[in-house]
Image (cartoon, rainbow, N blue to C red):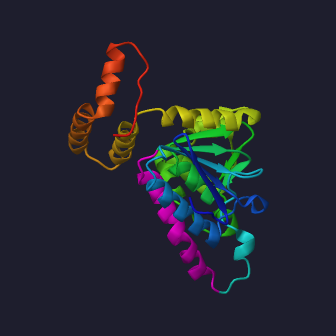
Amino acid sequence: MAAYETVDLEVRDGVARLTLNRPDAANGVNLPLARDLMDAVLAIAADPAARVVLLTGAGARFCGGGDLKGFAGRDDLPSHLREILGPFHVAIAQLVRGDAPVVAAVQGSAAGAGIGLVGASDLVVAAESAKFVMAYTGVGLTPDGSSSWFLPRLIGLRRALELTFTNRVLSAAEAREWGLITTVVPDDDLTREAEALAAKLAAGPPQALAAAKRLLHASLESTLESHLAREAEAISAASGSAEGAEGIASFVEKRAPVFNRD
């Protein structure tokens, strides 16, 4: 794997651990981070050893959003933001469309673009002290990084409007209750719990998990009939795969399945 300036990437035991690494800037998104994140996510997609992505942030916060201090005073800010959002949005789209399930581990806070990264993740484990806030309109800006796409789908339009207009801060417990995140754990257990979840997924059937991920995302924009056809094709293909054969055999034989890439 290539070395990056603002993110760390390590693939081990089927898990691609992707860490935003600008802790002194709350892992704020600037142009180098956007480019590094895109390159790292594309590298993960090309690596057959990466079955699961574990997305984390170095330091006290998961991601504080855009790097506002770096934006201040720029005469070219509109074009600069477009330059940042090009690679950042590619990274978001690849996390969502890629085969590997994405587990996010959130500590401290997820704000602005950090909400987009939370939305783009498939499962989200948060420390009980974590906070979630949109923050955009509070500084005269509008949502980006997929946050305005995911929020209505995850928590409903009315709540998405409330968070966006008022910049209300959600606690981890509220975020779990609303459906923004998956689970809340004690602060000291965050890393262990997120790694255990990622390891569990990495031991699962990668092709079936990828196909299930695609089905669930496609359901949001499909008619019932077209989606039923997708389901039929997907399960038929899975039943003829080595994963399907192993899964059924292990069930019948009352043993744990062992899934490998075909």
Q: Position of residue 103 (x, y in %)?
A: 55, 43
Quadrant (top left/top right/bottom left/bottom right) for the N terminus: bottom right
The answer to whether 206 is drawn above or below residue 97 in the figure is above
Q: Position of residue 95 (x, y in %)?
A: 48, 53
Asked if residue 92 lies in the magenta stretch, the reply is yes
Compared across the picture, whether 197 is left or right of 222 comes to: right
Asked if residue 133 lies in the magenta stretch, the reply is no
Residue beneath the point at 33% across and 26% down: 246
Residue beneath the point at 69% across and 75% down: 71
The answer to whether 255 is drawn above or below residue 118 in the figure is above
**Pick the front one: 156 or 106:** 106
Residue beneath the point at 35% across and 17% down: 251
Q: Position of residue 67 (x, y in %)?
A: 70, 68
Quadrant (top left/top right/bottom left/bottom right) for the C terminus: top left
Let me know if residue 144 appears in the view: no
The residue stretch that appears in magenta? 76-100
Q: So how many labels did they put on this image?
A: 0
Let me know if residue 73 appears in the view: yes
Compared across the picture, whether 139 is left or right of 101 comes to: right
The answer to whether 216 is drawn above or below residue 117 in the figure is above
**Pick the front one: 200 or 31:** 200
Residue 227, quarter of picture: top left
Main secondary structure found in the magenta portion: helix
Q: Position of residue 250 (x, y in %)?
A: 36, 19
**Pick the front one: 110 or 38:** 38
